[in-house]
Amino acid sequence: MTAVSTLISAFMLPVNLSLYVSLLDSEAGVPIPWGALLQGIGSIAAAIITGIAVSTKFPQWKGWMSKIGNVSGVCMILLTAIVAVLPKKPPKGEERGTPLWGKEASFYFV
């Protein structure tokens, strides 16, 4: 059931995103990186389908694959956190923006 709900939620993400963007002010013109979004959804779908196929063909590997999946998930979370926290160099000639933790409280309340 977890694999099915993950696939459904991955494919519903663009639908949800389109709905919320359409509810915004139509003059805002929010750009959506559809290519990157679909690439991420495709990689999730490929991983789930591959995992289901391998565990069906080789049921004795289920425990080992589950451990690898859990470790991979934790590594992805840690990598994302590290990349989000590390300072990025601004492009040449541009100033660096204020980090999220340096903004005033009014920034967070719309």
Image (tube, rainbow, N blue to C red):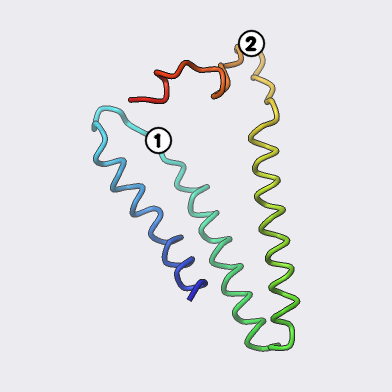
Q: Nearer the viewer, residue 92 or 6?
A: 6
User: In the image, is residue 5 above or below residue 60?
Assistant: above
Mark 2 neighbour class, 10 Å CA radius: few under 14, some 14 to 19, many 20 or more: few
The residue pinned by badge 1 equals 31
**Residue 101 at x, y percent in the picture:** 56, 23
Instruction: Tell whether label 2 touches label 1 (CB within 8 Å).
Output: no
Residue at figure coordinates x 74%, y 83% from the top left: 61
- Asked if 12 appears above or below 58 in the picture, the reply is above
Crowd tier of the residue under label 1, counting other residues whose Cα lies within 10 Å: few below 14, some 14–19, many 20 or above: few
Query: Dividing the picture into quarters, in which one does residue 50 lie?
Result: bottom right
Would you say 18 lies left or right of 48 here?
left
Q: Identify the image quadrant of the C terminus.
A: top left
| Nearer to us in this view, 105 or 59 | 105
- Camera-nearest residue between 93 and 84: 84
Identified at 34% across, 52% down, the residue is: 16
Element type at marker 2?
loop
Depth order, front residue of 74/9: 74
- Mark 1 residue type: Pro
**Quadrant position of residue 108:** top left
- Horizontally, is 42 left or right of 74 in the view? left
The tag earlier along the polypeptide, 1 or 2, is 1
Q: Going 54% across and 66% down the picture, which residue do you hit?
A: 45
Residue at 58% across, 21% down: 99
Quadrant of residue 74 in the image? bottom right
Query: In the picture provided, is 35 more to the left or to the right than 99?
Result: left
Q: How many marks?
A: 2
* Residue underneath mark 2: 93
User: At label 2, which amino acid type do we have?
Assistant: Gly
Classify residue 22 as left or right of residue 95.
left
